[in-house]
Image (spheres, rainbow, N blue to C red):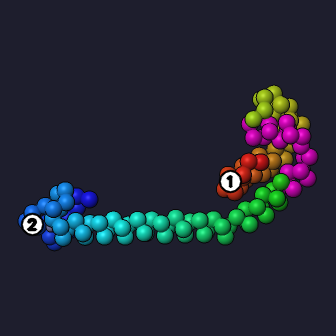
């Protein structure tokens, strides 16, 4: 609030509100209200962009999930191993059973899966 426009730096009016004279207080309040409105508009924009992208994220997540299931139909425990939730020995055993390329592909798929899940805001 304690802000004075550069051109009015030598405002010598008697402070009415805090450090600011009545005129500059009004200007400061208006500027603050404008900032608030701008922030609200930005938040609305972000929500709008998110709403537009959500169906695409959901569709991609379904595709990623389908490819994961196709490459390696996992049990819940095995799927969790890729996400690092399971005991490391499960991950090791699981990865040993797969080719490097496939492991890399699966890791990439699970990364994307996690990313999309986070974006969508749902737990898998
Ligand atoms: Zn002033």
Q: How many marks?
A: 2
SS of the residue under disc 1: loop
Q: Main secondary structure of the magenta part?
A: helix
Identify the magenta region.
Answer: 66-84
Label 2 residue near ligand 1, CB within 8 Å: yes
Residue 20 appears left or right of 36: left
Q: Which mark is residue 63?
A: none
> Pointer 1: what residue?
121
Say which of 26 and 54 sits in front. Answer: 26
Q: Residues within 10 Å of mark 1 (few under 14, many from 20)?
A: few
Residue 91 appears left or right of 47: right
- Residue 115 visible in the displayed image: no
Q: Which mark is residue 13?
A: 2
Asked if the magenta segment contains residue 1, the reply would be no
Q: Residue at x 81, y 44 (%)?
A: 103
Q: Residue at x 19, y 60 (%)?
A: 17
The quarter holding residue 15 reads bottom left
Q: Where residue 85 sits in the image (x, y, percent)? A: 75, 35
């Amino acid at each position: 609030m304690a802000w004075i426009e550069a051109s009015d730096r030598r405002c010598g009016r008697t402070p009415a509100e805090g450090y600011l004279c009545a005129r500059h207080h009004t200007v400061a309040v208006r500027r603050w209200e404008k900032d608030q409105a701008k922030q609200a508009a930005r938040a609305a924009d972000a929500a709008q962009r998110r709403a537009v992208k959500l169906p695409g994220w959901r569709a991609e997540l379904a595709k990623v999930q389908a490819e994961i299931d196709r490459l390696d139909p996992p049990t819940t425990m095995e799927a969790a191993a890729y996400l690092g939730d399971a005991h490391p020995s499960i991950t090791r055993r699981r990865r040993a059973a797969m080719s490097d390329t496939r492991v890399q592909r699966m890791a990439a798929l699970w990364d994307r899966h996690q990313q999309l899940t986070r974006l969508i805001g749902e737990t898998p």
